[in-house]
Structure formats: structure tokens, C-alpha cells
Amino acid sequence: MRYTSLALLTLTSLLAGISLFGKNESKPNIILIFTDDQGYNDLGCFGSEKIKTPHLDRMAEEGLILTSFYAQPVCGVSRGALMTGSYPIRIAEPNNVKQLHTVPHPKEITMAESLKEAGYATALIGKWHLAGNPNESDNSFESALMPNAQGFDYFYGTPRFNGFTVYVDDTPMRSRIMRNEEVVVEAVESWDHITQEYTKEAIHWIEQNKDQPFFLYLAHNLPHVPVGASEGFKGKSEYGPYGDTIEEIDWSSGQILAKLKELGLDDNTLVVYTSDNGPWIEPTHAPRGADTDGTPFIPLDHSGSALPFRGWKMSAWDGGSRVPFIARWPGKIPAGRKSDELLSTMDLLPTFAKLAGAKLPKWDIDGRDATSFLMGGTNTSPRNDYFYYSACLLTGVRSGNWKLVLPRSGNPSGTGWWGRLIEEIPEVQLFNLNLDPAEAWKLATAHPDIVKSLMKRIEWARKELGDLDQTGSGARFFDKGKRRLQSPIIVEKQ
């Protein structure tokens, strides 16, 4: 196997336990751009023909694309996995209640806390969604669960999501915007300018912290509905309102990269771009598979695309959790590289910690250090499998190109509002994702040995991580009492 001289140097340094950086070279800055409900197919470099993303396409040309990168299938659990480097079912939550949107216990160690302890300035600009529901009396959130108490020096954005309807006026629900613990906008009435505002905040914060290592988590609220775009982008995309939103996020990413060059930080900054889950595709109010009257819920021009994969946000198919991934770091990550090796959001915590010289939590996490893999020191990812969970329901596992899907009922009890987008699977199914990304060709009977091997991994996950009806031996609890489910399992009487 042949490597570039840079890759050989990187690999040699890693194997020898030597720092990636010389004595006189500062720790790298880290910027994570995280979008909301963006589909795999919604960037030019990932196949979109209608959505124009020149800045992100150029970022991909100058860096690395991963085509088998996994998040979790819903917003809150995805952010919980990202921040803690763990499957959400493993994460401790207040009062041991497993929420449908994960609420990490204050004693959990987040990515921001790890990097802050290593001397990094830390900021979250955008969506948090890890503090549970607001208090009904004053719409406030528990301070111990908010970003400033979880390792972020600076926070500007929304405690939860921006909405759950196509248009703001479709519901009385309104989101607030906060700066640290101060409410700066009590009720957002339009999301048209949020990407502009976040970009301005991000650039200003970078300028303020350019002389020290920093970690910026830019977590866009969009393209989660209600979508929005400012005057320069509204009505411009061939894809419609959703495309307008993505094209403005592309502009925002270009602004961030340009500011790094202007400040001379480009060569010492790792920038990662990815999404929290697949696109929210739900064109009718009724559960999938049921008769409907065709009443629109989310028009297709307000939803993204997961093609060529099957499924969507909240589903157990790859379209729910397989998302675009781009990483760029001039001089460190070889340009123009593309890999189909497995990696996940959980792997970013140990990877960032390695680069920053930061400590990891003292307990077991599920993330793996991917430093050498990202930098081209090896073509093999440290991740050899990925377990699919819908809420606390274990639905399958991927290893290599093989994906095993477990039997389940439609709209499974215990999965709450996720369930309406989960279909019945009557028997074990096996797919080769390399040959069949749409998960259409059932191969279980032709490959019983592979089914048997993957079932052993399933058995490990049930024992270590848990399942809907089983608490894992490795699940974390910081409060007394047994695990409880926010959406309990209902046993039907025979």
C-alpha cells in the first residue's frame, strides 16, 4: 500500500505516540458545522443536481468526503451522541428517564467540557436541544442542562428546535433565541434571517478568539421546518424553499472558510461539515402505510432527499441516519480523498480530544479516535460496526457492507412519536449496502453465516447497551432508581 510522505509522517508519529504537532506549533482550532434534517443527497458533491453548493463542493475538493458516515435518526438523540461520544441508550439522563430527545445528565462529560479543560475557547452558535422541555410557567430551561453549564463559554441560539410545522403561523409554538442565559428574542416569527445572524455571530466570535485555540460548534437550526432564507437567496434555488435554505447555508460555510484565510488560521483549523440526521419526509398526516386523504404535512419542496438510500428522518433505514460528511484541514487532511469506510458522530469526540491533547471521560464511550484515518495515515476506519436504534429499540447493525435488520412491529410501542414512521418487519433481513443502498434485495436466506455473525454483534449490543425491554450493563446512571422510558411499552391484553 502506498502513502504520501505526509501520510507516512502522520502514521509514524501516531504509532510512536508522538504529538502530531511540533513544539512550536499551536493546537488546532476545530469548527464543527452541523445542519438539521439535511439529507445525504442535498449537496452538489453528494449528488444533488438542483441545489447549488459551490463553497461546500470546493471544501470537499480540498479535503475528505465520507460516504458511510452515521449520525442518529432524530435531532435530540443525535446531538446527545455527538456531545458524549456514546450511543444515546448508554447516556445517563436526569432521574433515569430515557427521553425521546436525549437529555444528558449534568454529570455527563461533553465534547465542549473536554476541549475547554484542554485550554480551548468554546462556543455554540445555533441549536442546542439537549435541555428537555421548557418550564410551562415561564418557558425557561434548567440552567444545569444548558450550554453554558455543559462546557460552552459562549452560547447564542435556540434551546430547542425552531418548530414542527411547515410555516411558523401553523402553530402557536414559538422558539426563543438566547445569548448565554439572556433571552434576546422571546418569540421568533420568521426564520428567514437566522443563517445570516448565526454567520455574523460565528465570524465575530472567531475574530475575538483568533489568538488562542478554539472550538466552534455552529449548529444551524435549518433546514428543519419551518425553513427560511434571506432576500438574497429566497426564490433562487431550482429545488424551492428547501433548496434556498441549503444554498444560504453553503454561503455561510464559505464565509467561515474565507474568514479563516483572512485571519491566517486556515492551515491550523480543522473544519467538519455534517448533519444531525436524514431529511424529514412526511407528506401526509396519517401513519405510513395507512389510507390517507393526501393532506399535506410537509411539502416535498420543504424536505430534503436521502437518495440513493431508503428511508427518512425517524426511520430505521439508512436514509434516517446516514448523512453527508466533509472534513478539511489544509496540509493535514489530504485533498480530494473519498472513502466509504464507516464512521459516526460519536467518533468526533475522541478524535477532537486526540488533536487537542484533551482527556476523555473516565467511563466507556462508543466513539473511536479516527485521527490517523482522517489524515490519510491509514485507509481503514477505527469503526467496524454501527448499531441502529429507534429510541431505545435496537433495529439492526451494519458491519462492512452488510446490514442486518431485526424483526419489529409497525409503529412499535415504546418509540413514541418516532413510531409512525417505522414500518413492520416480519423477519430478519440482510442487505449488502454496497450493491443495494436502497435496501431492497433480501439476502438472509442466501447468507446464513453472515446473519449468524451479525446476530452475535446484536447480542453484544443488547447486553452492553440495552434494548427497548432491556437495560444494558454498560448504560450510565447517576441517579438512584431503575431506567424508565418517556414513552412506556404498552402490552396489549390477549
Image (tube, helix red, strand yellow):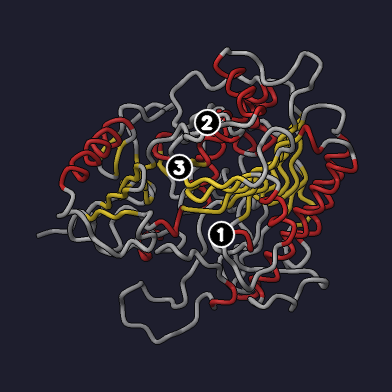
Task: Please report the residue visible at 57 percent of the width from the left and 12 percent of the height from the top.
Answer: 16
> Which label is found at residue 342?
3
CA gap, disc 1 to disc 2?
31 Å
Q: Quadrant of residue 429?
A: bottom left
Residue 70 appears in view:
no
Residue wearing tag 1: 37
The spot of residue 161 in percent (x, y) is 61, 56
Question: Disc 1 residue type?
Answer: Asp
CA distance separating discs 3 and 1: 20 Å
Label 1: which secondary element = loop
Disc 2 residue type (three-letter): Thr
The residue where tag 2 is placed is 378
Q: Nearer the viewer, mark 1 or mark 2?
A: 2
Horizontal arrangement in the rendering, residue 126 relative to residue 311 (left or right): right
Location of the C terminus (image quadrant): bottom left
Q: Is any part of residue 206 visible from this angle?
A: yes
Return the x and y of residue 114 as percentages of the image width and height. 63, 25
